[in-house]
Image (tube, rainbow, N blue to C red):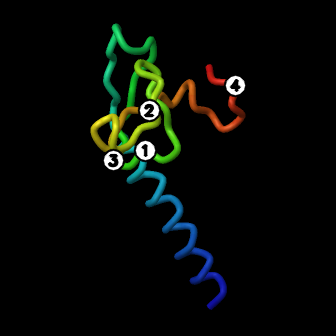
Amino acid sequence: LIAAVLCMNLEFVILKDLVSALTEEEGVKLAGVHEHKLYYQSRATFAWCKLCRQRIGVLTGGYEGFKCKECSKSDGQGA
């Protein structure tokens, strides 16, 4: 019984990683805006526009935006 539960959990983790890898978006390169690829975010939270320096929200046309994964690493250091 324990082996079956462990196998199901392992199968779930492997399948989850596989689906994430196969459905990852490619990103877009906007040379005039940023030097790295940008990835779409349907809900930008506590984010600032690097062009107009305003917080993303009502004043910038909504809460959607693009984010650079290279510059937004968890350690805050960027690329």
Closer to the camera, 54 or 66?
54
For mark 1, what is the residue?
44
The crowding category of the residue bearing disc 4, from other C-alpha atoms within 10 Å (few below 14, some 14 to 19, many at least 20), is: few
Q: Amino acid at mark 4?
A: Gln
| Mark 3, secondary structure of its residue | loop
Q: CA distance from mark 2 to mark 3?
A: 10 Å
| Figure check: 19 above or below 1 | above
Quarter of the image where the C terminus is located:
top right
The quarter of the displayed image where residue 39 is located: top left
Q: Disc 4 on helix, strand or loop?
A: loop
Residue that label 4 marks: 77
The residue positioned 33% from the left and 31% from the top of the image is 26
Question: Of label 4 and label 1, which has the lower sequence position?
Answer: 1
Q: Which of the two labelled residues, at mark 4 and mark 3, occupies the earlier sequence position?
A: 3
Secondary structure at badge 1 equals loop
- Quadrant position of residue 67: top left
Q: Nearer the viewer, residue 12 or 45?
A: 45
Q: Residue at x 45, y 17 (%)?
A: 36
Percent x, y of residue 46: 52, 44
Q: Rounded to the nearest whole Å, what is the CA distance between mark 3 and mark 1?
A: 7 Å
How many residues crowd around disc 1 within 10 Å: few (fewer than 14), some, or many (20 or more)? some
Q: Which residue is mark 2?
A: 67
Q: Secondary structure at mark 2?
A: strand
Mark identifier at residue 42:
3
Q: Nearer the viewer, residue 24 or 73?
A: 73
- Say if 17 sits above or below 49 in the image: below
